[in-house]
Amino acid sequence: MSIRNTYFFVFLLLIGCIRDEKRNSAELLYWSSNNGGEIEFSKWVVQKWNAKANTKIRYQPIPEGQTSEEILLAAVVAGTTPDIYSNIWQGAVEFYRVSDVLVALDTLEGFKQFIESRCDSATISEITASDGHIYQFPWKINPIMTIFNKGIFQELDLKIPPITYSKYIEAAARFKKDTDNDGYVDQWFGNTSVKLAWHQRLFNFYPLYLASSGGMPLIKDGKANFNNEHGIGAFRFLQTMYKENYFSRQNSAAGQDLFVGQKYATKFTGPWEIQYLERFKQEGFTYDFYQIPVPDDHVGPAYTYCDPKNIVIFATCKNPQKAFDFIKTMVDEEADLQFLKFTNQLPRRKNMEDNAGFVEFFDLNPKMKAFLEQAKYVRGVSNCEVMTEVLDIISQEYEACVLYQLKTPEQAISDAEKAVNVILRVDS
Amino acid sequence: MNLGPKKFLLYAILIIASLTFLYPFYWMILASVTPEENIGKLVFSPQGLTLSHYKDMIVKIPIWSALFNSVLVASLSTFGVLVFGSMTGYALAKMRFKGRNLLFFAIIFTMTLPFQITLIPNYILMVNFKWVDTLTALIVPALNSAFAILLFRQAFMTIPDDLIHAAKVDGCGELRIIFQVLWPNIIPSIITVAILTFMTSWNDVLWPLIVIREEGLMTMPQLVTLFAVGGRAEAQLGVKLASAVLLALPIIIAFIFLQKYFIQSMASSGIKT
Amino acid sequence: MPFLIVSPYLIHLCLFVLFPVVFSIFLVFHKWNIISPMEYVGLDNFGRLFADRLFWKSLWNTFIFILVHIPLQIILSLMLAYFINSKIKFKSFFRSAFFLPVVISGVVITILWQQLYGLESGVINQGLMAIGLGRIEWLTNPKIAMVSIAIMATWKNMGLYVILFLVGLQTVPQSYYEAAEVEGANDWQKFRFITLPAINPTIFMVVILSTIGGFSLFIEPYIMTDGGPLNTTLSAMLYIYKQAFGYYHMGYSTTLSLFFALIIMSVVVIQKAFVESKEY
């Protein structure tokens, strides 16, 4: 090998290393979430757009990772963000706003009229940042409810689903069983993730807290707002479930889905579960949804968390006005209906009940009606720059108190409150 | 041959031990072709046969491009380590120059330095070079290895100077001497370095997790890891195991054919450290 | 000419080793998430480190892992090597069988063992139940989870250490054993007084190798437990990864790395010094 060959090798190396796809600057890059239904929807809407617009959209689902929030943050840090991202968690937007990486949408032409025609004022005020600008376009929600196995409820003679804590616990005690007599319980009344990742608390603790408290926020006026009967009650309820082994402590990702396997009678989940179950359920498996359980003395509607996901335009986008035009196409009536059909997730638009196309969908999909009803009583998350860290702290206490019963609910909630107030003070 | 009780016990222990090492792989491969609802029942005998996990997995994740990336990254890193490692090793063994001892010391220092120190600053470097989400970030930092340099240095030191002088008389340049005259004499060292570098690169997952977020550019272990912990497998076990089998297969096959070299290389890497 | 030949390495060294080390020391005094401007914070990161209970816990967990892993590794792999080294057939088959997990990616091993460790459907617990023993909460019991990971790691690396011990065992001259037999020594005495002293250097090598390996414990808890239950499998490396690439606390995570690396280096230096003092 001569010197020349060595240089040739180095040259080859460089060629091999150059990014395989050079980004065409006239194009806009759009990332969607990476679940099956949304990928189908995104392909459909991009095709529709590209068929007539001259600024083409290049589409790609967000890369796989532990959470999409983690991937997005990595992209922001590395400067590899897309122009448009359609699945941002509402709780993360404030952090990006502070970091100056988002386009203020209300500075774009026609934004105000458009959003007012689609969303009610409550939604608009929920997504307005503390500086008065709007950085996210409200797109879709997935209210969290209790799913139940109809067959099991029939066997347990539960004509009305157990809505209060004590009824739920009583039903759970009746269902817990060791069916094969090996000395271990092998069917549980319910299940919810035992993983520590912060976002898991949005699907167990937080909906219970919202249901109990009538929709109170976790953070209010820059301070923790959950050290009250509702927070403690939710912890105690969940703690009972694990202490008595009514909920399984198995990590669901480690094994197979035991709700599909009819070993769990209920779980807390969103409408996405319908499509999933239709694909994987066994013959004769029937199910339905009802509200999140509430304390025995609860009055008024049961609120829940709705897992709002929105659309943002990153500041790296060269043509935000065009990007906004694409967003308008993504959420027009036809697209919203398609989205609903593809994904079973609710578009965040008002007056769906009065629109013939949507009414027809809900008539054909009666299970989705429960979510439509529930959508009147939903909450997102507080506008807080360190929301993920807040939920991380709650997760730590949740594990110690709820899963392993090392702390009383009072102690755990109060410890969480203190820790949250510390980081809120640090960051303000 | 008659087996005494002692010999019998010896064989029994060794056979049980080998089963402990082989059975999990048997289970994994079998589970990856077992229908989802039967995987829980699987112990020894097959519980039905299906290829659907493989079909689903190939649709869900770009496993073939990940395989290609892994092969590309591992081959280029190995090639780089072999070329640059023997150049530096040769200079240290056979050339005299100012700062040679300093360089040698630097290499020893690099070897004792835990990788934990350089991990985060190197990531920041990648961000600044705009190498995040490019294969460059995986290849370029892996082009040199202190271990390989020391191994080549040792190998070259055993070669008599006369051979080099003779080649110089024939008008060979230094690079020709290294790659045409000396390389054929140190084949075992080359094989060791090649196997170790290739395997390190093939199995590395921490660094790709940090610098690659674009699916089309991920390496195979990274993609399989994220598939295992992420949501795309939709809590289905079979597809995860299928992806794990595909990740293990190339190395299992290579190992079956090259056992001797694998074992020798890895043993020597242990002894030299 | 010599400089031309070593230049690829020199450039590489400066860029990916020396510069990062220097830059680390600089970062330690700053707060930075890459997106926003860097902020000088003096010694704040160290103050935070010493008050960070989770970091100390992760260090402790890493030590637990190493303390379980090393003795287990040495006893089992020495035992297997000793058996293989006796006069038996199929030596190379046994050697290769033990070695297979060594070459396979830790990712595969972890995904596989996560299933083997399953509470109900896991093969190990099914086996325990079949022979009338109770099942074990391998990955959900906070007292056991780290031990489970250590067992898996021992299983994965065993083949390598079996080979290293075999190399060591083969250096013991056969004549020693023959002489001992003449003296009437039994198997245990032969092992204790001939084999063990001869392979002492190999044992120390195994200790050092598995210590360094143990300190980098990452992908196993990352895939299997994400640090849970109750943070008992949160290894130092996993915690640093989370600080660095979960929150982008670059200054703080660099401080943690630097501190952790110093611990690793001191442990290894102490071990090596101990070995050298024994050798003379």
Image (cartoon, rainbow, N blue to C red):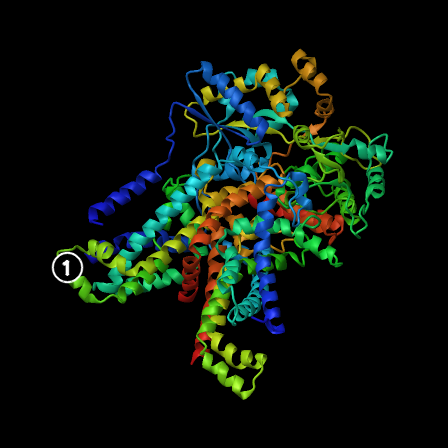
Q: How many marks?
A: 1
Q: Which amino acid is tagged 1?
A: Lys
Residue A383 place in picture, x, y as percent:
60, 34
Q: How crowded is mark 1: few (under 14 residues within 10 Å), some or many (20 or more)?
A: some
Residue B192 place in picture, x, y as percent:
37, 58
Closer to the camera in the image, A354 or A228: A354
Residue C148 appears in which quarter of the rendering?
Answer: bottom right
Residue C141 appears in which quarter of the rendering?
Answer: bottom right
The relative height of residue A63 versus residue B158 in the rendered view (above or below) is above
Residue B7 place in picture, x, y as percent:
59, 71
Q: Can residue B38 be seen in this view?
A: yes
Residue situated furthest front in the rendering = B1
Residue shown at 42% from the left, 59% from the top: B260
Tell me the subunit letter for badge 1. Answer: B
The relative height of residue B226 versus residue A317 in the rendered view (above or below) is below
The relative height of residue A145 versus residue A235 in the rendered view (above or below) is above
Q: In which quarter of the image is the C terminus of chain A?
A: top right
Which residue lies under the disc numbered 1?
Answer: B168
Give the side of residue B21 with respect to residue C130, left or right: left
Q: Is mark 1 on a helix, strand or loop?
A: helix
Closer to the camera in the image, A321 or A2: A2
Give the side of residue B86 with respect to residue C153, left or right: left
The relative height of residue C268 versus residue A378 in the rendered view (above or below) is below
Residue C165 place in picture, x, y as percent:
49, 69
Residue shown at 53% from the left, 82% from the top: C193
